[in-house]
C-alpha cells in the first residue's frame, strides 16, 4: 500500500504550488541557493579581480609594457607616450591621470612585476577563442592556431595562388613556413583576391566558393582596374628601392647621424619645432628642421611629422641633391623610405617641408615623448 503524505507535507506542497502560480520569479530554495553561489564564485575569480587592479589608469586595458608614476599608478606604454606627447605639444608638464604628480622619462619607471603578472593572466585567441596565458597567445596565433587568418593572404600575395597550389600538391610539401598542410580548418582567401574578391574562410570551403565566385565573370575593365591597383603598389615599392640602389652608385654620397631636439618659437602662442645642430656635407653647412602636423593646431590623435633641409651659407652655383631620412643607429624610429630631390640656389636655400613617412601615429607619439629623435640622413650630389 502506497504511503499517504501527512498533513504537514500537503501544506508545504500547497504553499509551493501557490507561490509558483502567483509569483513569476519564484524558484525553489535549493536552485536559488545554487545560482547565488555560482554568481558569487564568478565575481570572486582571482583573474577578474587582478584585471581590475593591474589595468592601465588611462585606457583601462591590461598593459604589456607597464610604467608607473612616483605614487605607483600604472600606465601602459601607449598611454604613457601619448601623455608625454600631448604635454610636449602643449608646452605643459605631463601629469599622472590619477594623482596629478609630474611624470617624465626620469621619474617614471618600468614595473616588471606587473608585466609578469599580466603575462600570466588568461586571454582569448582572437581567431579560435581558445583561453591561454597572455605570454602564450602570440605563439599560439602565429604557429599553432588553426583559425589564423593572416597566413594565407600573405602567401597568396608573395608567391601567388597557383604556385601555392602546386607547392601543396608536391609530395614533399608537408610544411610551409612552419604551417602544416594537413589542417583543413585554416582560414584562407579566394584565389581571385587579386581582382577584388574579399572572401575569407576555412580551407575546406575554398573549393566550393571558387566554383561559385562571381569575380572571374567580371568584365575585362573591372579586372584590369583591380589589377592596376595592385601593380601600382608593387611598382611604387620597387621604384623606391631601385632608386636607392642607383643613388648609392653615385660618386658623391654622404650620410650623417643626427639628433632632432625640441625647441619653441618666440611667438605669443609658441609652437613646437625640432632642429638638428649644424653638420657638414659637400663643403657646406646644413641643418634639418621638423614640425608636427604641419604646424596646424589640432587635438586629433592622428599625428604626423614633416622635415626640411636647410643650407646654411651662400652658394654661387646651383646644388642639386637627393636625400632620404632613415632610422638612426641609436634610435627606434620606424619610417618607410622616401627619396626627395631639391635644387639649392642663392635664392632657394630651404626645401619645402616633406613628409617624414612614420608608419603610424603611435610611433609619432613615441618620438614626441622621447628627449631627442635620432635619424640618419643620406645625401647624394647629382651635379
Image (cartoon, rainbow, N blue to C red):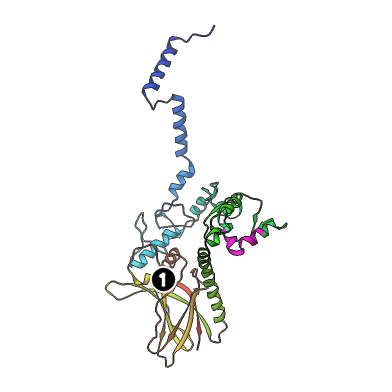
Disc 1, SS: strand
The residue under the point 55% across, 62% down is 194
The relative height of residue 117 versus residue 22 in the rendered view (above or below) is below
Task: Tell which of 255 and 167 is nearer to you.
Answer: 167
Residue range highlighted in magenta: 153-165
Q: Does 307 sit left or right of 117 as displayed?
A: left
Q: Is residue 241 above or below residue 130?
A: below
Question: The N terminus is located in which quarter?
Answer: top right
Number of labelled discs? 1
Please check the rendered image and state whether residue 156 is part of the magenta-colored stretch, yes or no.
yes
Q: Nearer the viewer, residue 16 or 33?
A: 16
Q: Residue at x 55, y 75 (%)?
A: 241
The one nearer the camera, 22 or 316, is 22
Image position, residue 294 (x, y; %)? 37, 72
- The structure residue drawn at horizontal position 61% and vertical position 49%, both measured from the top left corner, is 204
Given the current orientation, which residue lies at the most extreme bottom position?
A: 316
Q: Is residue 61 visible?
A: yes
Mark 1 Cα shell of 10 Å, populated few (<14), some (14-19), many (≥20): many
Which residue of the protein is positioned furthest toward the left in this rendering?
Answer: 268
Residue that numbered label 1 is attached to: 305
> What is the quadrant of residue 166 in the picture?
bottom right
Percent coordinates x, y for residue 228 in the rendering: 52, 68
Q: Is residue 187 visible?
A: no
Left or right? Give the position of 274 relative to 255: left
Residue 24 in which image quadrant: top left
Q: Is residue 229 magenta?
A: no
Relative to 108, does residue 124 appear above or below in the rendering?
above
Q: How far from the left and from the top, in percent, is residue 151?
A: 58, 57
Residue 217: x percent and y percent? 54, 58
Q: Main secondary structure of the magenta part?
A: helix
Residue at coordinates 49% horizontally, 8% vertically from top-left? 4
Amino acid at each position: 500500500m502506497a504511503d499517504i503524505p501527512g498533513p504537514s507535507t500537503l501544506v508545504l506542497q500547497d504553499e509551493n504550488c501557490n507561490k509558483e502560480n502567483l509569483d513569476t520569479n519564484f524558484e525553489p530554495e535549493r536552485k536559488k541557493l545554487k545560482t547565488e553561489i555560482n554568481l558569487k564564485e564568478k565575481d570572486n575569480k582571482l583573474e577578474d579581480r587582478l584585471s581590475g587592479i593591474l589595468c592601465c589608469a588611462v585606457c583601462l586595458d591590461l598593459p604589456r609594457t607597464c610604467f608607473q608614476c612616483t605614487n605607483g599608478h600604472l600606465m601602459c606604454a601607449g598611454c604613457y607616450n601619448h601623455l608625454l606627447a600631448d604635454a610636449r605639444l602643449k608646452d605643459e608638464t605631463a601629469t599622472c591621470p590619477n594623482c596629478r604628480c609630474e611624470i617624465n622619462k626620469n621619474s617614471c619607471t618600468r614595473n616588471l612585476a606587473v608585466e609578469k603578472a599580466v603575462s600570466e593572466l588568461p586571454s582569448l585567441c582572437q581567431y579560435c577563442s581558445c583561453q591561454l596565458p597572455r605570454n602564450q597567445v602570440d605563439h599560439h596565433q602565429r604557429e599553432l592556431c588553426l583559425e589564423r587568418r593572416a597566413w594565407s593572404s600573405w602567401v597568396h600575395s608573395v608567391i601567388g595562388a597557383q604556385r601555392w597550389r602546386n607547392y601543396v600538391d608536391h609530395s614533399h610539401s608537408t610544411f610551409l613556413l612552419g604551417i602544416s598542410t594537413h589542417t583543413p580548418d585554416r582560414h584562407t582567401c579566394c584565389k581571385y583576391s587579386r581582382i577584388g574578391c574579399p572572401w575569407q574562410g576555412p580551407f575546406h570551403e575554398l573549393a566550393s566558393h571558387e566554383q561559385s565566385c562571381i569575380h572571374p565573370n567580371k568584365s575585362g575593365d573591372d579586372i584590369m582596374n583591380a589589377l592596376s591597383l595592385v601593380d601600382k603598389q608593387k611598382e611604387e615599392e620597387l621604384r623606391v628601392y631601385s632608386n636607392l640602389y642607383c643613388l648609392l652608385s653615385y660618386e658623391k654620397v654622404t650620410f650623417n647621424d643626427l639628433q632632432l631636439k625640441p625647441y619653441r618659437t618666440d611667438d605669443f602662442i609658441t609652437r613646437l619645432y625640432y632642429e638638428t645642430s649644424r653638420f657638414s656635407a659637400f663643403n657646406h653647412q646644413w641643418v634639418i628642421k621638423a614640425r608636427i602636423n604641419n604646424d596646424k593646431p589640432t587635438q586629433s590623435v592622428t599625428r604626423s611629422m614633416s622635415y626640411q633641409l636647410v643650407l646654411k651659407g651662400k652658394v654661387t652655383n646651383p646644388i642639386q641633391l637627393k636625400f632620404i631620412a632613415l632610422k638612426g643607429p641609436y634610435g627606434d624610429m620606424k619610417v618607410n623610405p622616401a627619396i626627395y630631390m631639391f635644387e639649392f640656389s642663392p635664392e632657394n636655400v630651404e626645401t619645402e617641408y616633406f613628409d617624414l613617412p612614420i608608419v603610424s601615429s603611435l610611433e609619432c607619439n613615441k618620438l614626441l615623448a622621447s628627449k631627442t629623435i635620432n635619424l640618419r640622413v643620406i645625401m647624394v650630389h647629382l651635379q
